[in-house]
């Protein structure tokens, strides 16, 4: 928005020329007029990003220009300037939708700052709208919403392997969307018309999991009054998604391995196996490679499942997706609750983008759901977000390139973050870090951060 379009209105010629000169120097496209009537004529012909207008003018005043903008150009932000500032007039201006109220004599730095903030609000609003339109285009479809280059590469790989019918292992932290990826693979495969069956292996003990996966025949045990097909048989012609596969007991791993190898299942109490045509997609948030090496997970089963591995990145590594996903969840939650909440304020969006999300996409959905529940108007404001997001930035310790970061790397990252939060002020950063200015200088030199 550096090249935003501004309309400046002031019946004082000197003030008008000063503002026009300063704003043009900032790189903005500027139209300036001393007449409120001329300003209305300009607004009839074109839209402006920001209108800077004097409040008190003859014939047509700043409030009339504000009303015109609200009626004809709702995206335009209006900044009112007056030499007769009162609390009542400021409240009235803000109540009618003014972005800001500046009293004369003003400082040019203040005007620059307010105009830049208004343009940033417009940019975020437009981005918000574009993202919402993107979300709406894919309502009801198995679509993974992302702008991340890393995720785009994973999706391209998923589309390539989807038609091949090979087994897939999806790994990643909890809440990164492993089941959604499995559904995406199923949707792009030749099995799309077949069933997609999902089970969480960690939700059952060994006996119940065997019954869920393989089923039983009538009379197999006390209370078995009818045949029950297992989930593997239920997924015939489609896809079976085995979530938290590493929670499966060794005995169950043996049974599953046979089902994958022989493409058949033997229900409890049956004497004849059932042939099945199933694609297996497994997922885990644990390091299954290390588990296979240590013997905590069967290597032969690991190799059967790990024909292709898709490792999903945490949300903190794809921050560009946070606004897109937040708006997607906003639409879902608002519809479910029957509330007319359709926007996220720029301030709230910035807080979300700065947060590390240790719970990943699932945590983002929960936060947005909370915001919709607390919202009293059409917008989720910063006050509707959890206190953690508003009071501090949660930093998490994540692996770098598959390894745990060293203490020095963590210290360097933390110093860098504190400096950013302190606006580059090294004295303030040293106070926050609890060290003296010279010690901070030495660390900056040591980490080549000068």
Image (cartoon, helix red, strand yellow):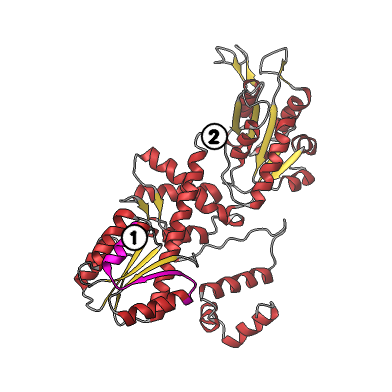
Which image quadrant is residue 14 in?
A: bottom left
Q: Is residue 137 above or below residue 30?
A: above
> Foreground residue, 392 or 117?
117
* Residue underneath mark 2: 141
Residue 297 appearing in the image: no
> Magenta residues, as a range?
25-44
Percent x, y of residue 81: 29, 74
| Left or right of 219 in this view: 127 | left
User: Residue 223, can we see it?
Assistant: yes
Point out residue 188 in the picture as x, y percentages from the top left corner.
Answer: 65, 32
- Res. 403 image quadrant: bottom right
Report the side of 323 relative to 156 (left or right): left
Could you say which quadrant of the image residue 448 lies in? Answer: bottom right
Q: Is 43 covered by the magenta stretch? A: yes
The residue located at (67%, 18%) in the rendering is 267
Say which mark, if any, is on residue 43.
Answer: 1
Residue 181 spot, x, y in % from top left: 62, 39
Classed neighbour count for the residue bearing mark 2: other residues with Cα under 10 Å, few (<14), some (14–19), many (≥20): few
Rendered location of residue 341, percent (x, y) = 36, 47
Residue 198 position (above or below residue 49) = above
Within 10 Å of the Cα at label 1, are there few (<14), some (14-19), or many (20+) other Cα atoms?
Answer: some
Callout 2 secondary element? loop
């Amino acid at each position: 928005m550096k090249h935003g379009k501004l309309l400046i209105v002031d019946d004082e010629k000197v003030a008008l020329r000063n503002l026009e000169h300063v704003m043009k120097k900032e790189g903005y496209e500027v139209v300036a007029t001393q007449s409120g009537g001329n300003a209305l004529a300009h607004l009839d012909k074109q839209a402006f990003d920001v209108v800077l207008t004097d409040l008190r003018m003859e014939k047509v005043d700043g409030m009339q220009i504000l009303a015109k903008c609200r009626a004809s150009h709702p995206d335009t932000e209006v900044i009112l300037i007056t030499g007769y500032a009162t609390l009542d007039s400021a409240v009235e201006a803000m109540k009618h939708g003014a972005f800001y109220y500046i009293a004369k004599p003003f400082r040019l730095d203040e005007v620059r700052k307010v105009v830049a903030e208004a343009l940033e609000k417009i940019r975020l609003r437009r981005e918000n709208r574009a993202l919402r339109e993107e979300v709406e285009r894919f309502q009801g479809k198995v679509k993974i919403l992302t702008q991340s280059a890393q995720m785009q590469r994973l999706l391209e790989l998923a589309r390539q392997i989807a038609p091949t019918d090979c087994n897939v292992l999806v790994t990643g932290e909890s809440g990164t969307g492993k089941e959604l990826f499995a559904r995406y693979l199923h949707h792009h495969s030749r099995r799309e018309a077949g069933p997609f069956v999902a089970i969480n292996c960690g939700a059952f003990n060994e006996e119940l999991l065997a019954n869920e996966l393989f089923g039983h025949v009538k009379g197999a045990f006390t209370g078995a009054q009818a045949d029950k097909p297992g989930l593997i048989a239920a997924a015939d012609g489609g896809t079976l998604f085995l979530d938290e596969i590493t929670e499966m007991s060794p005995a169950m791993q043996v049974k599953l391995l046979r089902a994958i190898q022989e493409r058949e299942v033997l229900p409890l109490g049956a004497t004849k196996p059932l042939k099945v045509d199933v694609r297996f997609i497994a997922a885990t948030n644990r390091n299954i490679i290390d588990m296979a090496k240590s013997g905590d997970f069967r290597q032969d089963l690991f190799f059967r499942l790990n024909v292709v591995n898709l490792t999903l990145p945490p949300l903190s590594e794809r921050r560009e997706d946070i606004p897109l996903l937040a708006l997607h969840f906003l639409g879902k939650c608002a519809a479910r609750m029957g509330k007319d909440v359709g926007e996220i304020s720029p301030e709230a969006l910035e807080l979300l983008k700065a947060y590390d999300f240790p719970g990943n996409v699932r945590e983002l959905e929960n936060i947005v759901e909370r915001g919709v529940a607390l919202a009293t108007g059409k917008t989720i404001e910063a006050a509707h977000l959890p206190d953690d997001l508003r009071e501090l930035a949660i930093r998490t310790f994540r692996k770098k390139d598959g390894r745990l970061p060293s203490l020095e790397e963590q210290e360097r990252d933390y110093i860098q973050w504190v400096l950013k939060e302190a606006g580059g002020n090294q004295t303030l950063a040293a106070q926050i870090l609890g060290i003296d200015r010279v010690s901070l200088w030495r660390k900056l030199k040591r980490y080549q951060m000068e």
